[in-house]
Amino acid sequence: MHGLIHVVMKNLVLEKFGADQWSAILSEAKVSDEDGFLALEAHSDDTTVAAVVAASKVLGASVEDVLRLFGEFFAESVHRGGHLRMLQSMGDDLRELVRNLNNLHHQLERSFRTASFPSFKVADTDGPDGHFKLSYYSLRGALLKPVVEGVLPSVARSLFHLEISMASLPTEEGMCATWLVAPTIAKKADAQSESSPVWLRWMAQWHTALICGPPASVCLPCVADIGEGVGEASVFKGSRTSTTSLDDMMQSGSMPASLQSELDHLASILDGSADPGEMLMRAVVAGNVACSWTDVRTLDEMFYFWGTNTGSIDDFQMSRQQDHADFFVSHSWAEPPDWCAVMGCHAQYAEVKAAELQIAAADMAEERGLKWEAVTFWIDKCCIPQQHTLMVTCVHHIEDFLQRCDRMIVLLTWHYFSRLWCVYEWAAFLAYHEAKSLRISVETFMRPASRDLYLKAIPNISIQHCKCHDETDRVVLKQKIVQYYISEDAFENFAKGTAVAMMAVTVAEIAGRSDFEFETEFFPWIKLAYDIGQNDLSNALLHADPVAWRKSAGGSGAGTERVKFHDQLNEWFDRYLQPVLTSLKLRSVKPEALQVLGKIRSKVTMKKSSQLTRMSL
């Protein structure tokens, strides 16, 4: 566990029992270096357990009571730190919040690689409204069960103004503890206990520390900061995302004469170029369009960038001409029509995009040994001059841009596959690249309320029925599909099969956290592959065993668990799934199209290799 937990433990003892008792606990736990014990870094579970046992002896309380008290104090301490705005959308009541905790835990696991998070299972009961059965699973076993019994009543009291009871029930098979959770008294809200966004974000930071490593920085704001809301006036924004047609974009805004002249010259020489796509290719650095969930003020700025597809001159000038980009960003500019019903109205679609891209950039930066802000994206709003006639030319060269991006990141909402441009970008990228080059960001959007929406969306992929903002786009895209794919049916089957496959790969990590999550998160994709008539794909998915992979990876939180899990995931992918996807591609994309399109990709790869060679010299 993380050293911040030791800090909270010290604060608990000092506040409730005094300095002498804290010194006695350190002595009993044989802690000679208090500064090292309180260091904000990962510590072994044995170190933390020894301190808890020592506290039990010194305070004359059972270990369970000490952990329960710690859980309650921990929840109270969330008023002093935090970082996740997405906690605003975790639920409008206690039951919904707990149902969505698994989603939150998986989001945190992507940022904190040494994490070993528990899983929760919520089930209805025959009792009164508000009662539910809660089961808990952790790779640590029942070690932290009492902490849950301390945290949950405190959270219910602070967030939802409820007193609750947690009565132990016979433990459900495959879980570590089971309770009947029942609200008993509704408490009147006071000013400090309101469910403010600041309170909720602080809760996330302390919660993360309990399980794993620290956020980038730990801030303990003063009471004045809490009262002021730390600049939160813009959290509950009334505006939602919006989209604009191509014609309206081209007519909006004015362009500096120097830029107008530069783009006019580029347009005049494109026809004589052997590779127009190379001349039009641009990229924007991640630092201009992405930010961490912890960076609240920049999130506010990102809201206005991601809130509309209409780009300004300033947006275009954020990008630079490049040979290639690290990521092609594929997404729907407009949020799903039922966004508030599924995600809650406090969650901002625009902000989710910025935060998801930061996570992707950080992952690539870690691979390449550079800063995440330097990772590059192709984003239409930045990389296409919307106020110039070149905009239409760029749209026709979308395949060139896709091939000049090493990877694609898909911000995959449940309505993504209902948009024809999105489906085309998805299929085209997978026609040019290996499937492992595609990254799906779905964890924030995937929750119990949206799971069935994803499962229903993929079988409904259809050139005729997918939506276009402008119907002339459908004509253009159908021409492209006829040019590159064996038939319209082949295109649709390719999109459906690859969508099921890549969704299954993405949810495998969530599904590996418990048998319950495998049944709810992974098995439906096996069934869907069978239902859409792709039996080879269904059989390949049946060979996946993410629960066993996670268990064999250790679960020690030592920093290698995630790597070992992905090693086994990749081995399964290469052995069973990749051959199915290769066969599907060969049955769907015209051979001559693969040859022609592959030339551009080869050219980009050779140029990158040449650049790397020069850099090494």
Image: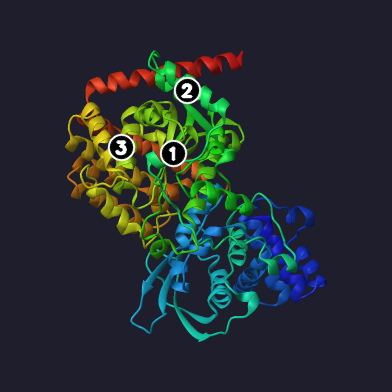
The residue lying toward the viewer, choosing from 551 and 456, is 456
Q: In this view, does 276 lie to the left or right of 420?
A: right
Tags 1 and 3 in contact by the CB under 8 Å rule?
A: no
Q: Give the mark, 1 or 3, whose residue is nearer the N terminus.
A: 1
Question: Is disc 1 placed on a helix, strand or loop?
Answer: helix
Q: Is residue 372 above or below residue 108?
A: above
Q: In this figure, which residue is indicated by the disc labeled 1?
A: 251
Q: Residue furthest right?
A: 20
Amino acid type, residue under disc 1 in the picture: Gln
Q: Where is the C terminus found, in terms of image quarters?
A: top right
The residue lying toward the viewer, choosing from 512 and 318, is 318
Q: CA separation, marks 1 and 3?
A: 26 Å
Question: Is disc 3 placed on a helix, strand or loop?
Answer: helix
Image quarter for residue 161?
A: bottom right
Question: Which label number is shown at residue 424?
Answer: 3
Q: Where is the N terminus found, in terms of image quarters?
A: bottom right
Amino acid type, residue under disc 3 in the picture: Tyr
Q: Specify whether residue 235 is in view.
A: yes
Amino acid type, residue under disc 2 in the picture: Asp
Q: CA separation, marks 2 and 1?
A: 16 Å
Where does the image place residue 616, in percent across and percent down from the top left? Answer: 60, 16
* Neighbourhood count class around disc 2 (C-alpha, 10 Å): few under 14, some 14–19, many 20 upward: some
Q: In this figure, which residue is indicated by the disc labeled 2?
A: 264
Q: In this view, does 175 lie to the left or right of 157?
A: left
Tags 3 and 2 in contact by the CB under 8 Å rule?
A: no
Residue mark closest to the camera, 3 vs 2: 2
Tags 2 and 1 in contact by the CB under 8 Å rule?
A: no
Question: Number of marks in the image?
Answer: 3
Q: In this view, does 327 lie above or below 162?
A: above
Q: Specify whether residue 367 is in view.
A: no
Question: Is disc 2 placed on a helix, strand or loop?
Answer: helix
Which residue is pictured at 76% across the width and 58% down the height?
31
